[in-house]
Amino acid sequence: MNNFAYSRAADVADAVRQIAADRNAKFIAGGTNLIDLMKYDVERPVRLIDITRLPLRAVEETRDGGVRVGALVPNSDLAYHPLIEARYPLLASAILAGASAQLRNMASTGGNLLQRTRCLYFYDTATPCNKREPGSGCSAINGINRTNAILGTSEACIATHPSDMCVALAALEATVHVAGPSGERCIDFADFHRLPGDTPDRDTNLESQEIITAIELPAKGFAENHSYLKIRDRLSYAFALVSVAAALEINGGRIRDARLALGGVAHKPWRDREAEALLQGAVPERTVFAKAADRLLRDAKGYAHNAFKIDLARRAIIRTLAQAANATPQIQSVKKIR
Amino acid sequence: MGSSIGAAGSRSESQAKPAAISITLTVNGESRTLSVAPWTTLLDLLRDRLDLTGTKKGCDHGQCGACTVLLDGRRVTSCLTLAVMKDGAEIVTIEGLANGDADALHPLQKAFIEHDAFQCGYCTPGQICSAAGLIAEGRAKTADDIRELMSGNICRCGAYPNIVAAIQEAMDAMGGRR
């Protein structure tokens, strides 16, 4: 880890002032990803601005029936919060599918959104990587790409976003609240993370002088018909090869509203409105689940080691939609997929 | 942590040598005031400055759990924790788990011995501190729950069945639910 200066932010305005004053500074909260990347020399900030003393730890109901989550709420506290357990069990389940108990105790809500890819080559400073070093090339496209993306890739980058929590937040259509030098703004979750295109060094649309202050969940939580299914190389504490968040609103034997988001397959949590539209109004059964899966995966592209993900994703989508429709969500401590 | 800051750029700013910072921690019940460089991890501070070598450095990347300690009562990986950020915190390591009495054993320590829940022992302090955190969290009710919620602690010897049995016994002894 390189030497760096350290300072504490007194409030949000002070944090924004400090980050604006030093373009090679970074905010630190939980640090579970940043410290790791610094130990690998992937990140080399000259200053860390400690934001853990900011008053961003509340989980509170909003006037329009939603819930606002402060950016510093630890992942474990969020997953086990009574409001989240009762009204957004899909989010609670996705959080508990990620990382380990220790890391969930440390990692912040805002930081979870900003974690970087676990592509092998992003971490290996001896190899080219357009995300780490723009213009140097992508080692994964012709390399060991078993864990890499199958959707929304570019010639420059086939990395995936590693978060589980974000897959649920995408399905729930959360909003990201941020503050910057020119004030506050809200970013729809679908617009927060980016596709790699020819600028894979930019993971998100957060500006360099902005800070995440909160995540807001809309009133609709799909608490009755939902499931988060994560498929990975070992049964716990591993990143997803494919994960699926499914949320359905079922009324009178038909699907009235449907959300489907995938993790482990793209540079951002992947949603496909056309696939979701195929589910709207349909009787919840396997044939329509399969149609939605085929639509979502119609442009999927496999590479030398990850083409298996296309069929895996198709099966996982069908299974997760069935779990959601049957109100038998995957329980993260039970490893049998039902 | 904005991603765009990760883009290539000049690192010429702020290159003056950063100053050490004074922090006070309560470690196993004892108040310790130390001057630390910002890049010192809690793990290195415990082992190299306070001579508390019970906490182990395994992977040093938060993947193995050998460095698990209790920070304000919650289990964390000390290798990914910067000491400067924890000014005022209360730390409990394996040395302090049995209320600082060097001859006493915590119910988890007793249960690990009774169940032969280790072979080489390197992961054991982390396993035990993690299990103490798990019991305090009160979320584990079944053996499946224990396995899932202990997945941040790797045992290369593969003592897992005995580790789960030891934790179940200690959880019962401590009045927790199985």
Image (cartoon, grey):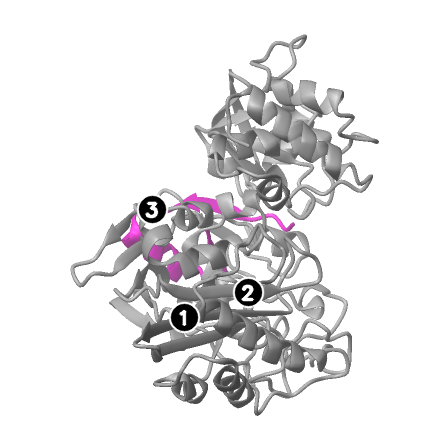
Find disc 2 in the rendering and name its residue. A229
For image coordinates 74% across by 38% down, the residue present is: B160
Q: Earlier in the sequence, mark 2 or mark 3?
A: 3
C-alpha span from label 1 to label 2? 12 Å
Find disc 1 in the rendering and name its residue. A247
The chain letter for the residue carrying disc 3 is A
Q: Earlier in the sequence, mark 3 or mark 1?
A: 3
Find disc 3 in the rendering and name its residue. A82
Q: Secondary structure at mark 1?
A: strand
Looking at this view, is B50 or A334 the one in front? A334
Q: Position of residue A133 (x, y in %)?
A: 64, 73
Please report contact status of discs 3 and 1: CB closer than 8 Å, yes or no: no
Q: Secondary structure at mark 2?
A: strand
Kindly indicate whether the residues beneath marks 1 and 2 are on one polypeptide chain: yes
Q: Position of residue A78 (x, y in %)?
A: 40, 50
Answer few, some or many: residues within 10 Å of disc 1's Cα (few below 14, many 20 plus, some between 14 and 19): many
Q: Amino acid at mark 2?
A: Leu
Q: Earlier in the sequence, mark 1 or mark 2?
A: 2
Which residues, given as a range, are shown in magenta?
Answer: A1-29
Please report contact status of discs 1 and 2: CB closer than 8 Å, yes or no: no
For image coordinates 23% across by 54% down, the residue present is: A61
Answer few, some or many: residues within 10 Å of disc 2's Cα (few below 14, many 20 plus, some between 14 and 19): many
For image coordinates 34% across by 73% down, the residue present is: A250
Q: Position of residue A271 (x, y in %)?
A: 46, 79
